[in-house]
Amino acid sequence: MEAFTGDSFFEKVYDVVRLIPSGRVTSYGAIARFLGSGGSARMVGWAMNSSHSQLNEIPAHRVVNRIGMLSGKHHFGNPDFMQKLLENENIKVENDQIVDFDSVFWDPGKELETF
DNA sequence: TTGCTGACCGACG
DNA sequence: CCGTCGGCCAGCA
């Protein structure tokens, strides 16, 4: 995948997040592990925090923690905005948690295993 | 330059 | 089962 030409860890994260198809979600740890950083899942979240800085729109609402909880909803300006976006993609959210998370989970390492 | 913080995760008791 | 702790690394005061 020549798409992953990002020099920094952040740009790689942005690339992966952008590749998340509509109606699917992934976790910070999955992205971190896919990038080979393993335990640096926090950096993925931090990259999301800086994602507003990017000119490209980052679908950060498709990135949640490993249990499918909308841990970062408070960073979307309005807490309900993230859930709204997910519901707009046929992803059910209940009590700040994605319903049937296992079905909508998108693993970069699995979907992009050719990498 | 040093040190604290953070949208996480896994291990341990 | 549930609370706690360490590690990961880039920004910022």
Image: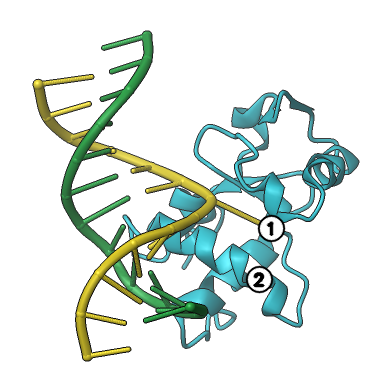
Chain colours: A cyan, B yellow, C green
Disc 2 element: helix
User: Which label number is shown at residue A103?
Assistant: none
Q: Which residue is mark 1?
A: A60
Q: Residue at point 59% right, 80% down?
A: A3
Disc 1 element: helix
Residues behind callouts 1 and 2 on a single chain: yes
Query: Which is more toward the observer, A79 or A31?
Result: A79
Say which quarter of the image contains residue B9: top left
Q: Position of residue A110 (x, y in %)?
A: 50, 50
- Residue type (three-letter) at the residue carrying disc 1: Ala
Q: Position of residue A78 (x, y in %)?
A: 82, 49
Chain to which mark 1 belongs: A
- Residue type (three-letter) at the residue carrying disc 2: Ser
Q: Residue at point 60% right, 42% down?
A: A71
Query: Which is more toward the observer, A103 or A111?
Result: A103
Q: Residue at point 51% right, 75% down?
A: A10
Query: Which is more toward the observer, A17 or A83?
Result: A83
Q: Is residue A106 left or right of residue A32?
A: right
Going from N to C along the chain, the mark reached first, 1 or 2, is 2
Q: Is residue A95 left or right of residue A16?
A: right
Tell me whether circle 1 and circle 2 mark residues in contact (CB < 8 Å).
yes
